[in-house]
Amino acid sequence: MNTYQIRKADEKEAALIIELLKEVAAWLQNNNINQWGFLLEGGEDEEITEAVINGDTYVACQDDEIIATVTLYSQKSEWDQHVWGNEDNPEVLYLHRLAVRPQYMKNGIGKEIINWVDENIKNTIRLDCVAHNSKLCAYYEKNGYSLTGTTADGHCKFQKVFGEGM
């Protein structure tokens, strides 16, 4: 049985997280999944580093190795503004860059991270993903996220609201 520790990323781990994300981006590209190609050229290196420094990024570790990561923004990024519009809600977090190292995929780690978020972060969680990746869209729906719409440029918007009916 695998055991993972999920915790906030440390500032000194930013380069390792960027490396992990680029590894996943390359895997996606090699598997003909048109997503995250901009990461390979360093498209978000600065933003990723800033998210780690600001305490918005979490890592899943196994035996001192970072095997997965996720970022939860409490403030809308420029991209979130594009996807979700002008509404400001302090109870909403925006999930970005959920990624698992390819050699650890298909072991339920992504689902475990989503469950950890559900149990530890009692905010409404929003995310988006490219609409043409039907497998990823189905993954988020299977894990309790509701499709709330699709943007004009082809991104599905998902949300999970906590506290409703409790």
Image (cartoon, rainbow, N blue to C red):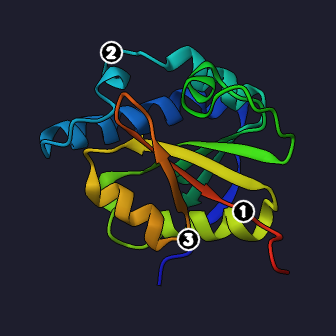
- Residue 5, disc: none
Whether residue 54 is visible, yes or no, is yes
Q: Which residue is mark 3?
A: 144
Q: Residues within 10 Å of mark 1 (few under 14, many from 20)?
A: some
Query: What type is the residue that disc 3 sits on?
Result: Gly
- The image quadrant of residue 142 is bottom left
Tell me where residue 44 appears, x and y as whole percent.
49, 19
Q: Nearer the viewer, residue 56 or 89?
A: 89
Q: Secondary structure at mark 3?
A: loop
Q: Amino acid at mark 2?
A: Glu
Q: Position of residue 52 (x, y in %)?
A: 68, 31
Identify the image quadrant of residue 33: top left
Q: Is residue 67 visible?
A: no
Find disc 1 in the rendering and name its residue: 161
Which residue is found at the position 57% from the left and 57% from the top? 61
How packed is label 2: few (under 14 Cα within 10 Å), some, or many (20 or more)?
few
